[in-house]
Image (cartoon, helix red, strand yellow):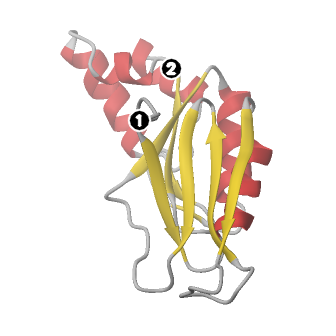
Amino acid sequence: MVTKGFTTCLWFDGQAEEAANHYVSIFKDSRLGRIVRYNEAGPGPVGEVLTVEFEVNGQKFVGLNGGPQFTFNEAISFQIFCADQDEVDYYWSKLSDGGAEVACGWLRDKYGVSWQVVPDGLIEMISDPDPDKAKRSTEAMMSMVKFDVAALRRAYAGE
């Protein structure tokens, strides 16, 4: 049977199982799946993790311990849409711990994976048909690292 939808494969350098456990601990409605270990055919040491399947918020992933040849960059990121400041703060804190805060709601986690932590309504604010509202919202957004929902709303309202 073929799995419907897409599964995102994330390439790690020996940290796939650790990363999967980390992500599953952060997001609700998440679970670990099958773990495949190297066998006598290699290329890794027998018994070490080759892949780990996991699901986060309904999205399927497989973590692959592929080695140091490839690393993550900002060309691919995951967006997390948050209902309020508490959610923004929660995800920001959990995902940036050991990583790096970047700009405009972007961060890199301790594995190098990029995330966008986006408050509800932001896209509507920066794309508002009223050019003044859109401009104020965009300027406020561009000045922030982690989003301050109240400040974004004030900018949108022209306060």
Q: Are marks 2 and 1 in contact (CB under 8 Å)?
A: yes
Q: Position of residue 68 (x, y in %)?
A: 48, 86
- Distance, label 2 to label 1, CA atoms, is 9 Å
Pick whichever, 18 or 143, lies toward us: 18
Which residue is located at x 71 percent, y 65 percent? Answer: 17
Q: Is the residue marked by circle 1 packed among few (<14), some (14-19), or many (20+) residues within 10 Å?
A: many
- Disc 1 marks a residue whose amino acid type is Ala
Which residue is located at x 54 percent, y 48 percent? Answer: 61
Q: Position of residue 97 (x, y in %)?
A: 72, 61
Count numbered badges in the picture: 2
Q: Earlier in the sequence, mark 2 or mark 1?
A: 1
Q: Which mark is residue 154?
A: 2
Pick whichever, 146 or 157, lies toward us: 146
Q: Which mark is residue 61?
A: none
Which residue is located at x 67 percent, y 28 percent? Answer: 85
Q: Position of residue 64 (x, y in %)?
A: 54, 67
- Disc 2 marks a residue whose amino acid type is Arg
Q: Position of residue 16 (x, y in %)?
A: 64, 67
Q: In the image, is 56 to the left or to the right of 60?
A: right
> As displayed, is residue 14 above or below residue 6?
below
- Quarter location, residue 132: top left
Label 2 secondary element: helix
Q: Is residue 147 visible?
A: no
Label 1 secondary element: helix
Which residue is located at x 75 percent, y 31 percent? Answer: 28
> As displayed, is residue 28 above or below residue 53?
above
Q: Which residue is mark 1?
A: 140
> As displayed, is residue 5 above or below residue 33?
above
